[in-house]
């Protein structure tokens, strides 16, 4: 199934997408803590309150996750272009819920940064409270997947050895358009094509078989030191082709249109706009 968080007529709701309609879940205002696996597997739907999906405003697929854990340097092509050593343990950093925006929202280009970059990524959405999950049971706590763009302010990222200040700007990280459940994707999750286009030009292209640390490894690693809860997000890293490592370099500017596509999950499209301060 495919689930979205949306707003319609001033009301926020979580819904299942069916043939161009959004069918609300009974009593659920957004995906996340209110939608553990047991809810997603057998949602109580309000069929008589369905909404044309085109008339709704999509929200970040999980608007208010408790945790957003991100992985850097997780594709060999990206490690190669950064000229870094191959990691032996996932490179982890965090974002805040205020960073998240939806499919179709503008990505805010802050006046302070002159090096705003794109990063196509697969997002893993957690569906159960879990700690110290064995690798071979990791998919048991995964609700599903979404498309993400880990927009990065490179000039801020490299101010220090820590990346937080370049990765967690408000209104900078699109995630959506929908949560596609794990049972719909199944074994294909290990080889989904992922690509990014900027103004129609393909700048990133790879597939999830190229992940250095796969999804079970990431779930096991993160849950070893922190308790995962429904709605938590793990961003799994980006392939090579980022703008900062190109020659000449490519950075996002107002009016640019960025599109990330992951097979089976959909297309995440956003426009760049200067932040109004």
Image: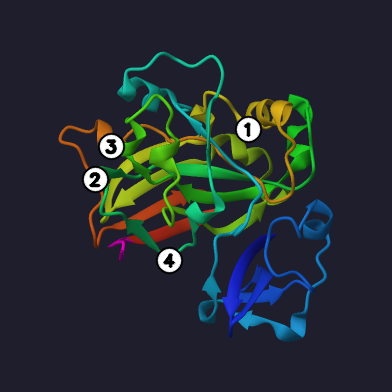
**Quarter assignment of residue 150:** top left
* Residue 212 picture location, percent across and down: 52, 23
Q: Is residue 8 above or below residue 109?
A: below
**Which badge, 1 or 4, is on the more N-terminal residue?**
4
Q: Is residue 99 left or right of residue 257?
A: right
Q: Is residue 117 above or below residue 82?
A: below
Q: Are marks 2 and 1 in contact (CB under 8 Å)?
A: no
**Which badge, 4 or 2, is on the more N-terminal residue?**
4
Q: Residue at x 42, y 32 (%)?
A: 163
* Residue 106 picture location, percent across and down: 37, 64
Q: Is residue 10 left or right of residue 25?
A: left
* Location of mark 1 (residue): 215
* Location of mark 2 (residue): 251
Marks 4 and 2 sit apart, C-alpha to C-alpha, by 20 Å
* Location of mark 3 (residue): 155
Q: Residue at x 36, y 27 (%)?
A: 160
Q: Are marks 4 and 2 in contact (CB under 8 Å)?
A: no
**Quarter assignment of residue 205:** top left
Residue bounds of the magenta highlight:
272-277
Q: Are marks 3 and 4 in contact (CB under 8 Å)?
A: no
* Residue 96 picture location, percent across and down: 54, 48
| The stretch drawn in magenta includes residue 276 | yes
SS of the residue under disc 1: helix
Task: Please say whether residue 20 is visible from this viewpoint.
Answer: no
Mark 2 burial class by Cα count in 10 Å: few <14, some 14-19, many 20+: some
Marks 3 and 4 sit apart, C-alpha to C-alpha, by 26 Å
Residue 104 tag number:
4
Q: In front: mark 3 or mark 4?
A: 3
Q: Residue furthest left?
A: 248
Task: Please say whether residue 33 is visible from this viewpoint.
Answer: yes
Q: Are marks 1 and 4 in contact (CB under 8 Å)?
A: no
């Amino acid at each position: 199934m495919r689930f979205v968080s949306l707003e319609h007529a001033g009301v926020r709701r979580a819904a299942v997408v069916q043939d161009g309609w959004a069918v609300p879940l009974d009593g659920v205002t957004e995906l996340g803590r209110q939608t553990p696996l047991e809810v997603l597997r057998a949602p109580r739907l309000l069929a008589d309150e369905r909404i044309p999906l085109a008339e709704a405003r999509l929200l970040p697929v999980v608007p208010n996750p408790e945790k957003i854990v991100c992985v850097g340097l997780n594709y060999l092509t990206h490690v190669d272009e950064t000229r870094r050593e191959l990691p032996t343990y996932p490179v982890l950093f965090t974002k805040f819920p205020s960073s998240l925006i939806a499919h179709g929202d503008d990505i805010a280009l802050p006046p302070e940064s002159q090096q705003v970059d794109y990063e196509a990524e697969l997002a893993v959405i957690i569906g159960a409270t879990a700690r110290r999950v064995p690798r071979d049971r990791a998919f048991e706590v995964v609700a599903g997947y979404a498309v993400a763009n880990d927009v990065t302010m490179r000039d801020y990222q490299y101010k220090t050895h820590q990346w937080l200040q370049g990765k967690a700007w408000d209104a900078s990280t699109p995630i959506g358009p929908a949560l596609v459940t794990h049972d719909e994707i199944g074994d294909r999750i290990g080889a989904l094509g992922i690509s990014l286009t900027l103004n129609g030009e393909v700048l990133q292209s790879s597939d999830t078989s190229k992940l250095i640390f796969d999804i079970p490894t990431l779930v096991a690693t993160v849950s070893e030191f922190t308790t995962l809860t429904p709605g938590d997000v793990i961003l799994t890293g980006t392939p090579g082709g980022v703008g900062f490592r190109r020659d000449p370099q490519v950075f996002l500017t107002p009016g640019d249109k960025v599109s990330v596509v992951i097979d089976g999950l959909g297309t995440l499209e956003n426009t760049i706009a200067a932040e109004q301060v």
